[in-house]
Image (cartoon, rainbow, N blue to C red):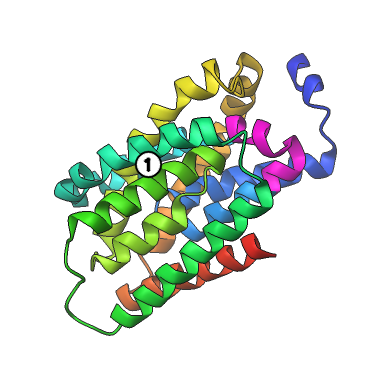
Amino acid sequence: MEFLAAFDLTFTDWIWIIVCALFVGMSKTGLGGLGMLVVPVMAGIFGAKPSTGIVLPMLVMADVFGVRYYHQHAEVRQLFKLIPSTLAGVVAGIFIGDWLDEGQFQLLLAVIILIGIVLMLLNFNRTRQLPHHTFLAVLAGFLGGFTTMIGNAAGPVMSIYFLTMGFDKNKFIGTGAWFFLFVNVFKVPFHVLIWETITWQTIRLDLLLLPVIVLGAYAGIWVVRRIPERPYRVFILISILLAAVKLMV
């Protein structure tokens, strides 16, 4: 455990890190809104850019549980529509990440999320889902890839897209699980070789948190099974709104 000394963490830091690991696990098995709380907390402890390299392996480990329990519900056609533009968004995020002013990025992301909320509200009480236009998939994929590379913050963007596509609870979780597992694994080499935010020390820290992530994943499964369909959509909507307000503040 001597490697932990390099992080210079206080007792309070450890409490928040454990809570974040629990939330990461829960967010990947259906309670996605909790994941948005992890980003600012970990950034406050480790720094904005270094924290992305610590959080990313945590997300990958939790993604495995999401895929394990909800893989059969994934909408494969939507994944094929999203992946090409998502990869383009990730690549754009790699090169723009060091140039974009953090305040401008947060404001832009918040505006995008709020626009998506308006769109989702317009469709909230309808039984007919929005048309599966290729443009919407390309736009959502690119924004999702860009925001996930910049700050592991694609959750609200993709949540809006999946809900406006009319996905029920299980299809929402299953499609998101496969999507984020693929994208997060794709991002790892860039964090290792270009940004150098993932090191042996950060990996060892992430592995130390694995039991907490597993506990959170099972807790998320237990909670989601007990939330009816419509309240679940309301929960996701409120989580996205709070994330947008947090980003603007």
Residue 210 coordinates in the image, percent (x, y): 54, 32
Q: In which quarter of the image is residue 211?
A: top right
- Could you tell me which residue is drawn at 20 percent across and 50 percent down? 78
- In this view of the protein, can residue 183 be seen by the observer? yes
Give the vertical position of 98 relative to 38 (above or below). Answer: above
Residue at the image point whose x is 36% and y is 44% from the top: 66
The outermost residue toward the bottom is: 125
Is 159 left or right of 108, judged from the image as shown?
A: left
Q: Within the image, what quadrant is residue 122 found in?
A: bottom left
Magenta portion: prevailing SS class: helix
Give the residue displayed 23% in from the left and 56% down from the top.
Answer: 135
Q: In which quarter of the image is residue 186?
A: top left
Vertical comparison of 102 with 172: above or below? above
Tell me the element at label 1. helix
Residue beneath label 1, please?
180
For the residue pair 77 and 212, the one nearer the viewer reads as: 77
Q: Quadrant of the C terminus?
A: bottom right
Visible residue check, residue 64 = no
Asked if residue 48 is among those painted magenta in the image, a careful observer would answer yes
On screen, 109 above or below 190? below
Q: How crowded is mark 1: few (under 14 residues within 10 Å), some or many (20 or more)?
A: many
Verify whether residue 19 appears in magenta.
no
Left or right of 13 on screen, residue 24:
left
Image quadrant holding the N terminus, namely top right
In the image, which residues are magenta? 41-54
Q: Residue furthest front?
A: 99
Residue at image point 41% right, 68% down = 116
Which amino acid type is marked by label 1?
Answer: Phe
